[in-house]
Amino acid sequence: MTPQSIPQRDQIENQHKWNLADIYADDNAWEDDFKKAQGIIETAPQFAGKLAKSPETMHACLTAGSELQMIIARLYQYAHLNKDLDNRVSKYQALTERAAVLGSQAGAAFAFVEPELLALDENKLREMAGQFEKTDEFDFYIKELIRSKSHIRSEEVEELLAQSSTVARGPDNIFTMLDDADMKYGIIKDENGEEVQLTKQRFQKFMESSDRRVRKDANDAFYVSYKDHVNTIGASLSSSVNKDVFYTKARRYDSCLHGALDGDNIPLSVYHSLIETTESNIDGLHAYVALRKRLLKIDTVYPYDLVCPLFPDQDYEVEYKDAVQQVLESAQPLGDKYGTALKAAFDQRWVDVFETEGKGSGAYSYSTYTRHPFVLMNYNNTVDNMFTLAHEMGHAMHSNLANSTQCFAKARYSIFVAEVASTLNEGLLLDYLLKKVTDTPQRLYLLNRSVDNALGTFFAQILYAHFELAIHEEVEKGGALSPDTMNELWKDLTQAYFGPDMTVDEFTPLKWSRIPHFYNAFYVYQYATSFAASAAILTKFLGGEEGLIDRYLTMLSSGGNNHPIELLKICGIDMATSAPVEATLKLFADQVAEIDKLA
């Protein structure tokens, strides 16, 4: 391969690739399940208007709906994962779209269920549900349905809303195709003067380069592509926000934020307090930018100076097999059952490891109830990628525990809880590595990595959350979004968060345009709340709190059988207070001060 080439799929060993036959043996098996789902959809009319007749009829309808959801989830998973292996292959783009359309059809066919159930007197509904063969299967669903009663519309409106879901996916699809399939980045020269084709994964690695020229060249070559497409991306994001406003009004919520948080029964005060508490205690972040300026010996700190190691002499590469071993060893405190399942995940090809031409960017864990989780990586031998691996395997193990413990109706958990599992694994990995360190330089390197992780997982996500809230509120009050207004908002927030030692460059205002999470409204704040919750749990664990690990694993195994704030209370964490966020801000400031002292 030439220096600028990207590996092809057939150049990767099978042990480092997903075995998607674990979902379906082949595309024909996918088609068989597709027909099965269509058959279940055709049974929907036999339940319509009859749910109040008997508990048996009601339970049969809910069971059929659950089976349908499980099949569609498998169909979409298989198509989407195949598509992500090479976004240029139109076949799996088509299968993904077919699965999504089928999901919309399923929602429309069973749209009568919730309005019909809610037409019953609440006591009558509870009484009938109490006569189900398994009374602990749909009990939380019924409870939540009653709680959300004011936001469930008539059968006719629910059917229309279900049918609209395919159209509503448009902005996200457009951005994904542009960002992952069509967007091309320039060629730059690396530290050795070799020409390299820029990709998202290589961009991240270049941002960690100790050569400032390389960082600047990568930054400029990367963001100029977004600048060239900013009007298209701006229109896409604006359309997504308008979609959110539409559903907010259709569901009779007070605001988009209210609609997004109500599903998990999260008080609005949690979101606002996260932003306000952080922005009122931002001095630690300002101090870190000033520290970077001193240690990097530069006159001006630009955004591309924020993630390069402060102690590059201690930087090192980690081969994938070594990363796997260290992730396994760092998870040992979680017990044998967890460790055995984690090792099996690596052995059984749950992870697609390396970047290849056309492959989806970044990393994620994708789980459905009836199949084991799949983890996408674009591993490139960095310490950061090792932590990302620990992070995504935390998600995978969470899903594995929940799916093997809970029934389908209670297995799916909220992102609010999900990110605790992933960031706790990162915390365990950091603790494991710090305990192996015997010299000050290595300790400084790892502390620097920890602080940078907080920068990306905590502070950046709160900045994103503020941005999301502002653009939604602008449209809600009758305003319109444009690239210029979003650029200006992003620029102002960046300056406020990073302080007087930060200088925004010409590309800084464009950074909103590359964030895919904005197409899933009010999602990113949960990274920050989860970061705070996991830090609190890890502090308790390292402090030797008796029985904490058992309670933690109980929380993971609980899946979605309760509201996420209540689940966290199993571990003694109350996110309805500002205490976990304040403690995280203090820990960050203390680590910055320790680096300042040791360096």
Image (tube, rainbow, N blue to C red):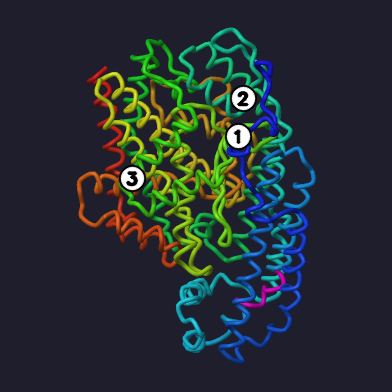
Residue at the disc numbered 3: 332
**Residue 174 percent coordinates (x, y):** 72, 43
Tell me the quarter of the image containing the C terminus. top left
3 or 1: tag closer to the N-terminus = 3
Q: Could you say which is closer to the camera, residue 525 or residue 342?
A: 342
Does 261 sit left or right of 424 as displayed? right
Residue at the disc numbered 2: 223
Per the rendered image, the range of residues in magenta is 108-114
Q: Is residue 458 above or below residue 405?
A: above
Residue at 59 percent across and 33 percent down: it is 354
Residue at 31 percent across and 25 percent down: it is 287
**Residue 517 percent coordinates (x, y):** 56, 44
Does 285 sit left or right of 377 as displayed? left
Tell me the quarter of the image containing the N terminus. top right
Q: CA distance from mark 2 to mark 3?
A: 41 Å
Q: CA distance from mark 3 to mark 1?
A: 37 Å
Element at badge 2?
helix
Mark carried by residue 514: 1
Q: Could you say which is closer to the camera, residue 380 or residue 449?
A: 380
